[in-house]
Each structure stands twice: as C-alpha cells, then as structure tokens.
Amino acid sequence: MNDLPATPPILLAGALLAGSFLGVVFFGGLWWTVRKGIVSENPALWFLGSLILRTALILAGFYYVSQGHWTRLAACLAGFLIARIILVKRLTRTFDDVRTSLESEASHATESR
C-alpha cells in the first residue's frame, strides 16, 4: 500500500500556474537578454550573467513550489513547458506572419461592410 497522502488538485493547479509564471520569467528573460546582448559591447557578460540569474531563480522556484512532492514538481514543470511553447510561438513570429495576419484582418473588415 502507498502511505503517502494524495496531493489536492488545488495545489496541483497552483503548481501549474507557478510553473507558467516561472516559464514566462525564464524565457522572457532570455528574449530580453538576447535583444540586449546583441547590441552590447560585452555580450558574453550579459549572456553568462543572465544564464546564472535565470537558472538560480527557476531552480529556487521549483524547489519552493514542489516542497518535496514529485507531483507538484511535475505540475510546475508542465506549466513551465506550456509557457515555453506559448512564448516561443508568440515572440518568434516573423514579420511576414504579422503582416499576413494584419492583411487578413483588414480584408475581413472590408468584406463585412
């Protein structure tokens, strides 16, 4: 028999939400670092400093959220990965995608008149 108590769904939902927040912080910080590092005179310092800071924040966040429970850690990781998928799709859209989307919206607006 398993003597461990089940994790309440509300805690798993909270862990998923916390993981999403951590993902936004990590990948948003990465995006910001790339934009700043490209124009910097010392990009290695930007990238290394950002990597250390982002990794420390995420590991501390995972540790705090999980509190020794693997189910909370798994939910937090799932939220982190969901945030990654959303941010990568959102932040890496090319200009052509944006232009095509705007043209499509404009054509729908003129057709509805």
Image (cartoon, grey):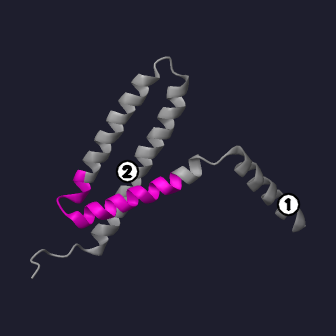
In the rendered image, which residue does mark 2 sit on? 22
- Residue 74 falls in which quadrant of the image? bottom left
Identity of the residue drawn at 30% across and 68% down: 12
In reply to whether residue 79 is colored magenta, the answer given is: yes
**Can residue 15 be spotted in the picture?**
no
- Residue 19 falls in which quadrant of the image? bottom left
Q: Residues within 10 Å of mark 1 (few under 14, many from 20)?
A: few
In the rendered image, which residue does mark 1 sit on? 107
**Can residue 67 be spotted in the picture?**
yes
Q: Residues within 10 Å of mark 2 (few under 14, many from 20)?
A: many
Relative image position of residue 100 (x, y in whole percent)? 77, 53
Relative image position of residue 53 (x, y in whole percent)? 33, 35
Horizontal placement of 17 versus 100: left or right?
left
In reply to whether residue 50 is colored magenta, the answer given is: no
Q: Is residue 67 above or below residue 98?
A: below
Quarter holding the C terminus?
Answer: bottom right
CA gap, disc 1 and disc 2: 38 Å
Identity of the residue drawn at 28% across and 68% down: 11
Relative image position of residue 25 (x, y in whole percent)? 41, 45
Q: Identity of the amino acid at label 2? A: Leu
Relative image position of residue 8 (x, y in whole percent)? 25, 74
Q: Which secondary structure class fits the magenta region best?
A: helix
Q: Which residues are magenta?
A: 63-87
Q: Identity of the amino acid at label 1? A: Ser
**Which residue occupies the foreground of this view, 101 or 96?**
96
Q: Residue furthest top?
A: 41
